[in-house]
Structure formats: structure tokens, C-alpha cells
Amino acid sequence: KMITSRVAVALGRQLPRTVSRVTRSSFGAGLVASRNFTAGKVNFAASGSAEVSSILEERILGQTAAADLEETGRGLSIGDGIARVYGLKNIQAEEMVEFSSGLKGMALNLEPDNVGIVVFGNDKLIKEGDIVKRTGAIVDVPVGEALLGRVVD
């Protein structure tokens, strides 16, 4: 692949810094590469847009890409504390979900085309067509000293 001149300049600026940190006994080809891969100073003062673009490119090269992907579904029906939701293909049994109203629920009935979710709270706040998000957390109950020796139903 071809490297643009701006990327080459940015790499040329970074290589001498990183190579100088390495001890002389541990670099061989790195020294040769840094000698052959240099970039002269470019006068960006004459063109302000070139300077801005080089600064932006350096910052972009230092960033890592991060994607925030969430699996969401839409409410089909709601009644008697049970919501039917379409679109949550990878949901697990007993996984916690969050409705757009802020209420939480637990997925119990996993069918091929929809999911039955038990709503924790007043189901009157949920309407058909509301967005439902997976949280990725399986519902669990913390256990401590106070629960030892007790019958849990």
C-alpha cells in the first residue's frame, strides 16, 4: 500500500524519538531504517491550511477507533407485565434489558421471531414501538451473611 507524504512525515518525526529510547545492542535494522527514512522540515507557515491538516492528521494517527454497538429491539405488545419484543436476536435467557422509559426487565421466553420479557415495574410506562436495549448482564442476586441459613423461594 502507498503511504501519503503526510503520513511519511509523521512517521519520520516519530521514529527518531522511539529509536533513541532503544539500547544500541537491541537495534539493528531499526537504526538503518531510521537513517534511511527521514523527512526534511517543511515550512508550513506560508500555508495555514497545510499546517492545520498536518496537525489533524497527527492527532488522527494517534487515536484508536472504538465502536459502540448495541443490539436493540422494538416492543410489539405489552400486557400483564409481559412485553413481546422483536429484534433481539442474540439475547440470552434471564438477561437484563432496559426499555426506553428507563424500566428494566428480564428476558425469559426466547422464540425465533420475538422475546418475552418480564417487566420490573409498572408496565403502563411502556408503549408499543418503544426501543429495548440489551444490557449484556444476566440477572443475579447478591448473597451475604444475612442470607445464610434462610430458605429462598
Image: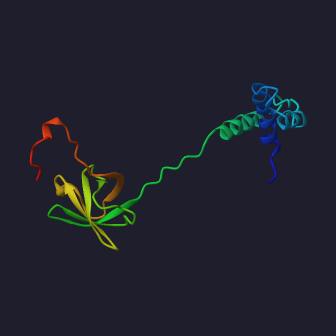
x 16%, y 54%: residue: 122
Among the 4 quarters of the image, the one containing residue 26? top right
The residue lying at 76 percent from left, 28 percent from top is 22
Q: Is residue 6 left or right of residue 130?
A: right
Whole-percent x and y of residue 71?
A: 41, 58
Q: Please, is residue 68 above or below residue 27 in the view?
A: below
Extreme residue in the bottom direction: 112
Q: Position of residue 152 (x, y in %)?
A: 11, 50
Figure check: 126 above or below 77: above
Q: Is residue 9 above or below residue 103?
A: above
How many tags in the picture? Answer: 0
Figure quadrant of residue 97: bottom left
Colour mode of the rendering: rainbow
Query: Is 67 on the left-hand or right-hand side of 80?
Result: right
Residue 126 falls left or right of residue 153? right
Q: Residue at x 20, y 41 (%)?
A: 143
State which quarter of the image contains the N terminus. bottom right
Residue drawn at x 20%, y 63% as measured from the top left: 82
- Residue 47 or 24: which is nearer the viewer? 24
